[in-house]
Image (tube, rainbow, N blue to C red):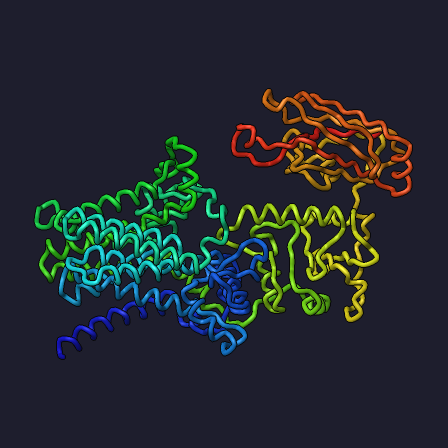
C-alpha cells in the first residue's frame, strides 16, 4: 500500500507540474466556460462556432455531421477543428449548459497536465528517479511547437497523444496491447487527423517490430491490424472525416515543410538565439527545440562520444520504430528541401503529390521525432552521467527552457488573459438584422467559398439566431459540393429567383450581377452596416420592418465615358467593371470566361449600333474550334466559330430589336453562350479546371 501511495503521489506531482506550466503559460481566464473573448478571431473562432452550431443542431448519423455550419458544403465537427471528443461529451448536456459555453480552456489544461504525466511515464523507461523524471518532463511540457499551437490550432495542442504513443512503443513488455493501442488510436481520431497519422505511424512501427522480433505471431498481428483499423475507421466515420469526399486533398505539400534548420530556428521564441531566414511556409514546420533542450542535447553528446552511453541501447529491438521516425522526418522535409532561405525541389509523380496533400502541412509530422530527440538526450545524460551531474544538467536545462521561451509565450499569455466576455462585438447593429434573424432560417454568402471575408461576423450572427449558414471557415470542404453551390447560385442570380428562407449577403463583384436581375417588387437590395444584403420577399413581409434605403440597380451599372472608347479587360483596365458573370480573374493581357456562359453589362454613352470584340479562344489541334452564341438584351445576334488562339476579331451588328431594347432599358447586356466549353485539365494542358472558351481583350462600341 505504501508503494502504491508513493507511486500515485509521483503521478500526481507530474500532473501538478503540467498544471503549473499551464497557469504560467496560458493563465486561468480561459478556464471560465463562459469566456469566449480569447476565441474571437482566426482558427479559434471556427473551433468555437463549429461547436456552437453542433450543440444547437439535432443528433445526426454519423454523429459528427454539423449541417448548420456549412449547409450544403458537407460540414462536420472534425473540419471546424472543434475537438469531436469533447463535443460528443458535452452535447448530451447542451440544454443544461449556459447559453455561452466553451470547453477549449479545459482542453488546454488537460493537454498540459497529460503532457507532463505521459512524459513522466515515458522517462520511467530510462530512470526510476522521480526527480530526474520530473525535471525531464518539464522539457516536454515547455515544448515550443506545443505552445505555439495555443494561439491557433487548439486541438493540435494535444501532443500528449504522441507521448502516449511513444510510451507504448518503448514499453518493454506491454500487456493488453490491443486495448492500449486501440483506445489511444480511437481517442486520437476524435481529436485531430494529423495527430492520428503520427500515432498510427508509431503503432504500425511497433506492430511490425514485434513481428520482426518474433514477439508477436503474424496471425495475431494481422488480427490486431484488422481490428484496430476497423475501430479507427468507425471513429473517423462518426467524427465526420468522410463528409467532404474529394475535399480531403488540398494543396501546399512542400510549401508547409520542415526546414532543415527548424530545430535551431527560434522564430521569435528565444532571447538568445536569433531568427534564421526561412521559406514562406516554413512556419508550419516550426520545431524549435528551445534553448534548454538544445543545451541538454549538446551535453548528451559528451557521454555518447566517450562511449559511456549509446543510442543503440535505446533503440535495441526497435529497428522498425527507427525506420518509421526516419520516414516521418523525410515526409516532413518533403520534396522541396529547405535549408534556411534556400530550397532544392525534387520531382515527384503527380499522384504521389496529391496523396501527400492529404497531410499538406508535412512539417508537423516531425513532432514524434522532436520528442524522441529530447527523450534520447535525457537517456544519454542519465545513463552517461552520475545522478548528481544528471540532476544538475536537467535542472539547468529546465531553467533555461523556462526563461528563454518566455520570448514566445509571454505574448500568447497576454492575448489569452484578455478581459473576459461572453459575447463577441458585432458590427451588425441595425434593427434590420434582428428582424431578419426571426424571418429567415439561413444566412448565405454570395459567392460561395471557404472562409469568405465576413465569415466570423455572419456565422456568429447566424448562431445567435439559430440560423444555418454557409459563411464558414473549414479545414476541408467538399470540392463537389462547393462547385454545385456555385452553379446553383449562378442560376439563382441569372433568374432572380432566390430561396425564400435565406438571407443573402453579397460580395462586391456579385452586387451588379444580383442588381441586373432583381425583382424590385418583392426583394430588397440594400446596404446595411457596411454589408450588401439581398432579402427575398422582404417587401411582402407583413411583420417585417419598413425597408431600409434601397440600392438603385441602375446606379450600380458602369457607364461608358465616351462613345469612341476602346475598353481593355486586362488587370487594372476600366473594362473589367463591365464583367458581370461567368468570368475568371483579370490577367495581364485580358480576362478568360469561366463556365458555359458569360455576360457584360454597362450603360452606353449614346446609341449603340454595333460591338467589336478582340479575343482569344482556347483551341488546340485536339479541340480545334469554339462556338459562341451572342445575344444583346435577350435578342439573338450571331453565332461565331473561333478557330485561332489569338487575334480573333468579332463584329456584332445589332438588329433593330436589340437597339430598341438598349434604348428602352438604358443598358447593354451582352450575353455569350459557349457551346463546347472545356477545361485545360480535360485537354491534358495541366491542372487548370476552369471551363475556358473566350478570353476578352478589348471591346469597342459603335
Q: Residue at x 76, y 48 (%)?
A: 495
The front one of 474 and 21 is 474
Q: Is residue 98 something that shows in the picture?
A: yes
Quarter containing the N terminus:
bottom left
Quarter containing the C terminus:
top right
Q: Residue at x 87, y 38 (%)?
A: 662
The mark tally for this picture is 0
Is residue 251 rendered to the left or right of residue 668?
Answer: left
Is residue 341 rendered to the left or right of residue 639?
Answer: left
The image position of residue 88, as x and y in percent, is 44, 67
Q: Is residue 402 something that shows in the picture?
A: no
The image position of residue 588, as x and y in percent, is 63, 31
The front one of 172 and 160 is 172
Splitting the image into 4 quarters, where does residue 156 fall?
Answer: bottom left
Q: Residue at x 13, y 47 (%)?
A: 312
The image position of residue 653, as x and y in percent, is 85, 27
Is residue 557 rendered to the left or right of residue 215?
Answer: right
Establish if 409 lies above or below 617: below
The front one of 294 and 284 is 284
Splitting the image into 4 quarters, where does residue 414 fall?
Answer: bottom left
The image position of residue 446, as x and y in percent, is 66, 51
Establish if 420 lies above or below 309: below
Amino acid at each position: 500500500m505504501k508503494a502504491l501511495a508513493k507511486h500515485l503521489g509521483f503521478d500526481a506531482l507530474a500532473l501538478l507540474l503540467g498544471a503549473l506550466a499551464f497557469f504560467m503559460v496560458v493563465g486561468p481566464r480561459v478556464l471560465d466556460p463562459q469566456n469566449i473573448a480569447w476565441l474571437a478571431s482566426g482558427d479559434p473562432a471556427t473551433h468555437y462556432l463549429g461547436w456552437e452550431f453542433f450543440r444547437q443542431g439535432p443528433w445526426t448519423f454519423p454523429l459528427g455531421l454539423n449541417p448548420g455550419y456549412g449547409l450544403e458544403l458537407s460540414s462536420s465537427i472534425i473540419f471546424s477543428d472543434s475537438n469531436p471528443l469533447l463535443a460528443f461529451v458535452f452535447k448530451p448536456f447542451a440544454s443544461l449548459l449556459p447559453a455561452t459555453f466553451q470547453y477549449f480552456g479545459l482542453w488546454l489544461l488537460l493537454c498540459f497536465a497529460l503532457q507532463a504525466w505521459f512524459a513522466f511515464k515515458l522517462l520511467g523507461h530510462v530512470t526510476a528517479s522521480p526527480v530526474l523524471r520530473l525535471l525531464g518532463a518539464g522539457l516536454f511540457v515547455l515544448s515550443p511547437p506545443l505552445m505555439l499551437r495555443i494561439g491557433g490550432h487548439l486541438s493540435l495542442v494535444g501532443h500528449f497523444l504522441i507521448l502516449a504513443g511513444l510510451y507504448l512503443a518503448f514499453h518493454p513488455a506491454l500487456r493488453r496491447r490491443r486495448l492500449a493501442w486501440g483506445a489511444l488510436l480511437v481517442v486520437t481520431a476524435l481529436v485531430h487527423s494529423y495527430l492520428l497519422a503520427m500515432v498510427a505511424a508509431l503503432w504500425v512501427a511497433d506492430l511490425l517490430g514485434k513481428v520482426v522480433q518474433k514477439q508477436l505471431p503474424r496471425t495475431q498481428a494481422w488480427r490486431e491490424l484488422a481490428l484496430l483499423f476497423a475501430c479507427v475507421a468507425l471513429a473517423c466515420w462518426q467524427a465526420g472525416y468522410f463528409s467532404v469526399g474529394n475535399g480531403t486533398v488540398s494543396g501546399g505539400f512542400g510549401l508547409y515543410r520542415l526546414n532543415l534548420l527548424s530545430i535551431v530556428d527560434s522564430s521569435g521564441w528565444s532571447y538568445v538565439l536569433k531568427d534564421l531566414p526561412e521559406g514562406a511556409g516554413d512556419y508550419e514546420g516550426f520545431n524549435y527545440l528551445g534553448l534548454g533542450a538544445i543545451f541538454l542535447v549538446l551535453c548528451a553528446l559528451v557521454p555518447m562520444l566517450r562511449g559511456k552511453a549509446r543510442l543503440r541501447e535505446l533503440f535495441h529491438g526497435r529497428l522498425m520504430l527507427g525506420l518509421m521516425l526516419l520516414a516521418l522526418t523525410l515526409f516532413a522535409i518533403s520534396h522541396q528541401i529547405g535549408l534556411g532561405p534556400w530550397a532544392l525541389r525534387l520531382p515527384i509523380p503527380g499522384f504521389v503529390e496529391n496523396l501527400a496533400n492529404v497531410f499538406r502541412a508535412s512539417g508537423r509530422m516531425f513532432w514524434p521525432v522532436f520528442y524522441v530527440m529530447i527523450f534520447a538526450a535525457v537517456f544519454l545524460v542519465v545513463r552517461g552521467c552520475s545522478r548528481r551531474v544528471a540532476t544538475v544538467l536537467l535542472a539547468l536545462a529546465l531553467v533555461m527552457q523556462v526563461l528563454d521561451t518566455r520570448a514566445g509565450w509571454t505574448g500568447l499569455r497576454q492575448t489569452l488573459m484578455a478581459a473576459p466576455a461572453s459575447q463577441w462585438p458585432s458590427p451588425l447593429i441595425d434593427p434590420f438584422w434582428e428582424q431578419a434573424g426571426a424571418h429567415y432560417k439561413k444566412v448565405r454568402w454570395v459567392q460561395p467559398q471557404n472562409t469568405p471575408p465576413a465569415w466570423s461576423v455572419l456565422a456568429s450572427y447566424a448562431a445567435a439566431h439559430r440560423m444555418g449558414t454557409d459563411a464558414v471557415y473549414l479545414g476541408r470542404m467538399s470540392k463537389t459540393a462547393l462547385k454545385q453551390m456555385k452553379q446553383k447560385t449562378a442560376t439563382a442570380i441569372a433568374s432572380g429567383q432566390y430561396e425564400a428562407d435565406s438571407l443573402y449577403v453579397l460580395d462586391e463583384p456579385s452586387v451588379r450581377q444580383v442588381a441586373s436581375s432583381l425583382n424590385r417588387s418583392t426583394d430588397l437590395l440594400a446596404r446595411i452596416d457596411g454589408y450588401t444584403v439581398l432579402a427575398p420577399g422582404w417587401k411582402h413581409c407583413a411583420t417585417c420592418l419598413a425597408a431600409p434605403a434601397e440600392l438603385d440597380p441602375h446606379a450600380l451599372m458602369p457607364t461608358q465615358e465616351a462613345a469612341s472608347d476602346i475598353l481593355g479587360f486586362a488587370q487594372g483596365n476600366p473594362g473589367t467593371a463591365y464583367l458581370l458573370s461567368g468570368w475568371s480573374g483579370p490577367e495581364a493581357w485580358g480576362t478568360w470566361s469561366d463556365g458555359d456562359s458569360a455576360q457584360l453589362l454597362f450603360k452606353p454613352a449614346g446609341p449603340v449600333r454595333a460591338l467589336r470584340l478582340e479575343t482569344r479562344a482556347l483551341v488546340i489541334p485536339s479541340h480545334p474550334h469554339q462556338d459562341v452564341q451572342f445575344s444583346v438584351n435577350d435578342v439573338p445576334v450571331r453565332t461565331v466559330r473561333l478557330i485561332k488562339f489569338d487575334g480573333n476579331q468579332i463584329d456584332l451588328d445589332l438588329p433593330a430589336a436589340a437597339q430598341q431594347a438598349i434604348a428602352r432599358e438604358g443598358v447593354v447586356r451582352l450575353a455569350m453562350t459557349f457551346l463546347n466549353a472545356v477545361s485545360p485539365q480535360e485537354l491534358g494542358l495541366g491542372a487548370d479546371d476552369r471551363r475556358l472558351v473566350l478570353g476578352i481583350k478589348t471591346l469597342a462600341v459603335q
